Image (cartoon, rainbow, N blue to C red):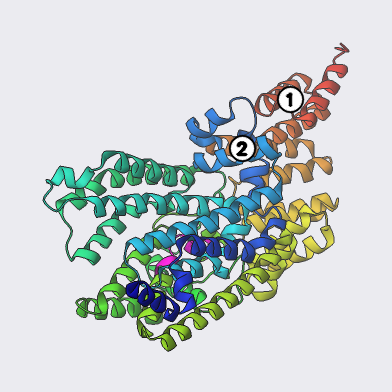
Amino acid sequence: MVSSASGSGELRRTPWFRRVGSNPVLAAFVLLAVTIAAHWPAVHADILWDDIVQITDNTTLHGPDALWRIWFEPKASPNYYPLLFTTFWFDYRLTNLNLAIAHGVNILLQALCGLVLWRVLKRLGVHGAWFAAALFAVHPVTVESVAWLIERKNTLSLLLFLLSALMLLRMEGAQKTHAGIWRAAFTPWPAYCAALVLFAAALFAKTSVIMLPPLLLLSAWWRRGRVTWADMLRAAPLFVMAAVLGYVTVWHESTSYFLTAEQDPRPEGPLSCLAASGWCLWFYLYKLVLPVRLSMLYPRWDVDPTSVLSWLPLAGLLVVAVAAWCRRQTWGRPLLVAMIAWVVMLLPVLGISDIGLFHYSLVTDHWQHPAMWLPLALAAATGARLFGRSPWASACKVVAAVVLLCVCSALTWSRANVYDSAVAVWADAAEKHPAGWGPRYLLGLSQVGVNDLNAAIGNLHMANELRPDDVPILCNLGGALVRQQKYDEAVLYLHRAVVLAPGSPEANFNLGIALQSLGRIDEAIAAYRNALARGTARGRIAPTKIAVAHVRLAVALQTRGDIDEAIDQCRTALSIVPDLDMARRVLASLRVERGSIE
């Protein structure tokens, strides 16, 4: 009885926030609820940018053989992320791509990422694990990955990555110190096989998580001060999987029509790319610490490798790393591990391979999503250690944590509201970066999509003034002028685009439409043929646009009297997109012209 009373008194003296924090079910519920609430406005988000190419206009997601094509025809979709596109296949089958439900799935995936991250950090013994996970879950930088539908690949791949890591860390905890190398590496087998499956699934969602194997070795060094043969054997199959699927992704993206076909996204050279990596890393840290003026697109930097100033950001990071290495026996070890892990996770988007988005910007919020939890965990652990364990210090720590989470949640809520429409997103980016040609250009494109042609042409003209020789801007400005039936002016811009990039299918296609509208049929036919030859040879035009180009060519041939070839072009179009009404109508008119009324 005395012992019981003593225990009861000790429980009453324990601060309420410690009792709440010791309840894992309640802590998990709070984490999920706060994350969903902070991102809730994202359920009203619109279709954005490449959502059109990768989801709404992706014919691979439809048809009886859709799943086979998604998994076993790598070139059928703009990216080879079969698990990601399988989820969108389910979205179409279950809800006909109800955007509110689809975005709700993204929000739930982000909340689950926070939940699993908490358990991973707990397993690693990181102080303030729950707060670090919650800070990641509601941080404003995550909004782009949640509100942009195609970026489900970020939340889905990270969730599977964390589950695989958690499984492998639990294996280490269950191993016996006296076990042999092979047994220590792979026992228990069911857990290891589950970890492999989860990692493969993460790679099939997005290969940006290929850095799990080196992170596992790094964590072993951090916790035990050395990397054993068992650690390397355990990581070896993961390295193989990462290398194979990483190569597939690089190969696919280097030949995909989703890349900017007309220009090299990184023409500056390897030294400029290396110097710019330091700029990118500091920029990402800055946005984590001060998440204000977030934007869907940031201005693209021109980094001159011959200037000493261009190398200062990278040099600053190296100085911090060397200082941490010198103090690796004390405070330097967690800082060094977090820095290395963070750089390793960001390595795929620092310029080692071409990414189409480099044409517009070297940094973007969604690229740091898989890695941002590392500096946040370091900050949370540092803050937890700075406060003492007295009730007063613990109370201050809780108040500071609650205030910070509330501020981040409010900023996330505000940022998620911007994604209500594509025009609003790009208008926000253009307002924050008026000297940037990319936001102005994409604002013009989104206005073309809602048929606000006057505003669209104005913004495209501004983008063209900021970047006169950019082929995509010239192509889309010419296309918008065609829609306004200003064919003579359109030809000027489109001809300029063809001169700059003779192999641009988009420029030739739009030029063909303008020339055909002006009655310059022979020139239009030549432009269409060039567009089809370039587009089909290198996979640079989406299948639907290839089919439309065949139909446009058929109409031009019909005007010239080449009925037989025009019919062949329509049949080719229907073989690409069988339900293309435009092709059926033109084919019917051609058959009537030949007297085949039936």
Q: Is residue 494 above or below residue 124?
A: above
Is residue 481 found left or right of 210 in the rendered image? right
Q: Is residue 173 above or below residue 132?
A: above
Element assignment for label 2: helix
Mark 2 or 1, closer to the camera: 2
Q: Residue at x 55, y 35 (%)?
A: 76
Q: Residue 347 or 335: which is nearer the viewer?
A: 335
Q: Is residue 24 above or below residue 188?
A: below
Check disc 2 and report the residue beneath it: 90
Check disc 1 and report the residue beneath it: 570
Q: Classify the position of the N terminus by image quarter.
A: bottom left
Neighbourhood count class around disc 2 (C-alpha, 10 Å): few under 14, some 14–19, many 20 upward: few
Picture coordinates of residue 255, whole percent (x, y): 49, 43
Mark 2 residue type: Phe
Q: Splitting the image into 4 quarters, where does residue 285 fall?
A: bottom left
Which range of residues does the magenta coloring cover?
364-374
Q: Does the segment drawn in magenta span residue 367?
A: yes
